[in-house]
Image (cartoon, rainbow, N blue to C red):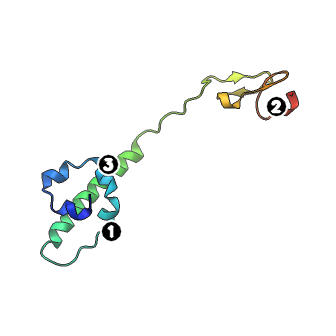
């Protein structure tokens, strides 16, 4: 969909646009060049309306909480080297037991 298609839509059709469609039109909304003529006021109003909606979407995206980091061992796992790790990829098997990356050479 092009920004020019938006100007031909009715207000109801513009209100039915999904958030993804509005975000996809962001460049056109911000940088569309309005030329003088009979449709200039209509185009300006449509762009203003879409820009307000885009700003609300951006504000909602910033305000939404980030997903929590999920660990394999939420309370931690104490290894044979004495270190505590929270993810499986941090555990290495040494000849004398489990070790973290820092202690692996010492325990091998």
Residue with the mark numbered 3: 20
Residue with the mark numbered 2: 104
Which SS class for mark 2?
A: helix
Q: CA distance from mark 3 to mark 1?
A: 18 Å
Q: Where is residue 33 shown, x and y percent of the image?
A: 28, 73
Figure quadrant of residue 11: bottom left
Which SS class for mark 3?
A: helix
Q: Nearer the viewer, residue 95 or 67?
A: 95
Q: Where is residue 38 shown, x and y percent of the image?
A: 12, 75
Q: CA distance from mark 2 to mark 3?
A: 48 Å
Quadrant containing the C terminus is: top right
Crowd class of label 2 (few under 14; some 14 to 19; many from 20; radius 10 Å)? some
Seen at 24% across and 73% down, the residue is 34
Q: Tag 1 or tag 2, which sits nearer the N-term? A: 1
Left or right: where does residue 79 sit relative to residue 95?
left
Seen at 85% across and 21% down, the residue is 96
Figure quadrant of residue 74: top right
């Amino acid at each position: 969909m092009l920004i020019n298609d938006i100007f031909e839509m009715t207000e109801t059709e513009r209100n039915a646009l999904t958030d993804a469609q509005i975000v996809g039109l962001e460049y056109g909304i911000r940088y569309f060049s309005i030329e003088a003529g009979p449709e200039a006021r209509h185009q300006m109003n449509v762009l203003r309306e879409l820009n307000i909606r885009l700003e609300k979407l951006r504000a909602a995206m910033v305000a939404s909480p980030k997903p929590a980091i999920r660990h394999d061992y939420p309370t931690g796992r104490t290894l044979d080297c004495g270190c505590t790790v929270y993810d499986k990829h941090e555990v290495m098997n040494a000849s004398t037991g489990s070790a973290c990356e820092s202690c692996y050479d010492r325990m091998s």
